[in-house]
Amino acid sequence: MKKVVLGLMALFFAASFSPAQAVDLADGFKLTGFVQTDYDNQDRSGVSTFTLEEAEVDVEKSIKDVGGMRFDLNYRSSDRMTAVSAKAGETTATVAGLADVSLEQGFVWINLPAGLKLTVGKFNAPIGFELVDPNQMFQYSHAMVFIYGLPTNLTGVNLSGAAGIVDFQVYGVNGWDKLQDDNKDKTIGGRLGITPLEGVNVGLSYITGKEGSDANNAAANNLSAFDVDATITSVKGLTIGAEFNSGKFEKQSVVNPGGDAEWSGFLVMVNYAITDKVSLTARYDTFDDKGGARFGSGVKEKRDAITIAPTYTFTPGFIARAEYRMTKSDQKVFVDKDGNSNDSVTDIALDFVYSF
């Protein structure tokens, strides 16, 4: 793993002479990526640590009027959410002890008539308001809807296109975050985007399919989610984002064995550029785990979180970002370093992100 990480870092520094700009290595050949480092302090676990959080190099090759390919080589030391996204009793130290080097994405695409595009491989799930990588985020952490209500990556085939104020994506994949399917059925879904006014976009998404399996496919149960996302950028310097999410995993309820595990959640985020260097983000998100299966705490539970995140831009592509996040549950599910159960947890983080 060390050789892979060193190779990734070498590629990053080779490209770092052109901040926030893709490096054109040859005709149709582009190299992009980022490095994220951070300091994280979590009150309940007592963890205070510096981390090389994530680094990524993205390689893309396109052929005009034909298609192309892309793969993202990613090193991730832990979930950026740290202890807030951990299961009950799991501390930041436990989560931060993990490390992963993988291909976050790897796909080919074919340009079709009428402006359509067919993508085959592993790709970021086209659903929800928040994006995957830290250089695409307004704040350090992801909302609970992103973590518990949606898949992150999908492996399969995706057809996309646009016409006028409408854009769409329709896909058939192996399942939520699965490289290989574990049953005989495919998960299907899609997103319909509408841009009624300049600077306003609304997306409607739905994903459904069977997850889990045994020898006769009898243990596979349907997992589905409905999601509405909205982005407003019509006022200069102001970005407003919102998302509503609900879902159900059949027969997977923890609090009612044999019943369905249902959930719902939403977020509202506002980012304002105070100057060309300084911006401020405020976000409220909530998630209701009605079946006790999404958080992993084993109880019916609802959490609310408030996040404040100022950002300073040194130069395009190089930012410093601080974050304060307080998450409160209606149950005492957060276990501190002394083994005491609490109903709230606070994270304070400072991260630096350089992207090219």
Image (cartoon, rainbow, N blue to C red):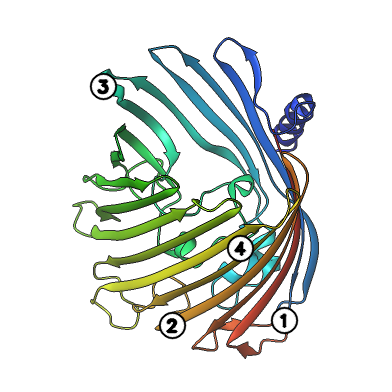
* Mark-to-mark CA distance, 4 and 1: 18 Å
Residue in the picture at 70% in, 80% down? 44
Name the front one of labels 2 and 1: 2
Residue 202 in percent (x, y) is at 36, 52
37 to 112, vertically: above or below: below
Determine the image quadrant of residue 171: top left
Name the front one of labels 4 and 3: 3
Residue 318 in percent (x, y) is at 76, 42
Residue under label 4 = 81
Name the front one of labels 2 and 3: 3
* Mark-to-mark CA distance, 1 and 3: 58 Å
- Residue type at mark 3 is Ala
Residue under label 3 = 114
Residue in the picture at 41% in, 41% down? 179
Sequence-wise first label, 1 or 3: 3
Determine the image quadrant of residue 46: bottom right
Q: Is residue 356 left or right of residue 242?
A: right
- Residue type at mark 2 is Glu
Sequence-wise first label, 4 or 1: 4
Residues under numbered marks 4 and 3 in contact, where contact means CB atoms less than 8 Å apart = no
- Residue type at mark 1 is Lys
* Mark-to-mark CA distance, 4 and 3: 41 Å
* Mark-to-mark CA distance, 2 and 4: 19 Å
For label 3, the crowd category at 10 Å Cα-Cα, with few meaning under 14, some 14 to 19 and many 20 or more, is few
Residue 200 in percent (x, y) is at 41, 50
Label 3 residue SS: helix
Sequence-wise first label, 2 or 3: 3
Sequence-wise first label, 2 or 1: 2
